[in-house]
Image (spheres, rainbow, N blue to C red):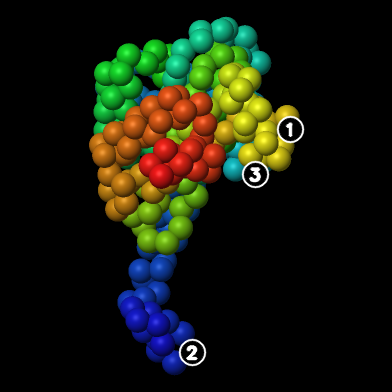
Amino acid sequence: MLTGFENAGPRPAHKVQEVIRINQSVGREAVHSHLKPELFTGFDFREFVSTAKDHAEHLKNPEVGAKLQQSDLDTLSTEGNDVQIIITDGLSAEAVHHNVPDMIPVLMDGLASRNYSLGKPIVTHFGRVKLAECIADALDCNVAILLAGERPGGDALSSKSMSAYLVLKLKNETARQAAAIYSEHEKIRYEYTLITNIYEGGLPPIEGGSVVAEKVMEILENQAAGNRLEDLLKAKIA
């Protein structure tokens, strides 16, 4: 018998079933929650929509969440900033609601303190991870930070868990060639660093803002992300 998973004959005990049902209910609610930009009162942002026609299509088809609808995309042009922050629902808008208000001020202040240029944050409905590349291409930023809710799982608290995808656009040809050799992908255009479990039960959002800011600085200074960045940092220490 698993600890904390007492059974009553062939079935879990009643109290265990209650906890499971509560966790499942909270998780389902998080998956079907809709992004509420009105909760983001501490900073200015631009608001867009992906090519998903509705929330149901967004959940079923990651590809439609990877691009902005054309009317929104047409409003964007080259800005060339160091960093562009993108906030989207991903698979749990509730996670975004719980973490973004506390995280964004710390993140933006940390980057600004090192004089990195920041684009006005973008909030996008029905977005998925690859949306970062679409927006980075349109704005020609160096790094896109995409904040998105994770797929709920485990206990009820984990439905509030958010991830930060730090996406380096390989504009520097030397860096791009190094990335191509490292990844064995000749046409690579982006490298990713992922920071997960940003929520009160994991990496608290205020601390998460500092962690993400520091990692973005490392990415920009080394023109590398993901495993290639970590190997470069280890080599410097050695």
Q: Earlier in the sequence, mark 2 or mark 3?
A: 2
Q: Identify the mark at residue 186; answer none if there is no mark.
A: 1
Let me know if residue 144 appears in the view. no
In the image, is 30 to the left or to the right of 139?
left
Q: Earlier in the sequence, mark 1 or mark 3?
A: 3
- Residue placed under numbered mark 3 in the picture: 60
- Other-residue count near label 2 (Cα within 10 Å), few / some / many at <14 / 14–19 / ≥20: few
Q: What is the x, y in percent for residue 153?
A: 46, 58
The answer to whether 1 is drawn above or below residue 147 in the figure is below
Secondary structure beneath label 3: helix
Label 1 and label 2: CA atoms lie apart by 55 Å
Q: Nearer the viewer, residue 133 or 234?
A: 234
Judge depth for marks 1 and 3 and give the one in front: 1
Query: Is 102 placed left or right of 156 in the picture?
Result: left
Q: Amino acid at mark 2?
A: Pro
Q: Position of residue 190 (x, y in %)?
A: 60, 30
Q: Residues within 10 Å of mark 1 (few under 14, many from 20)?
A: few
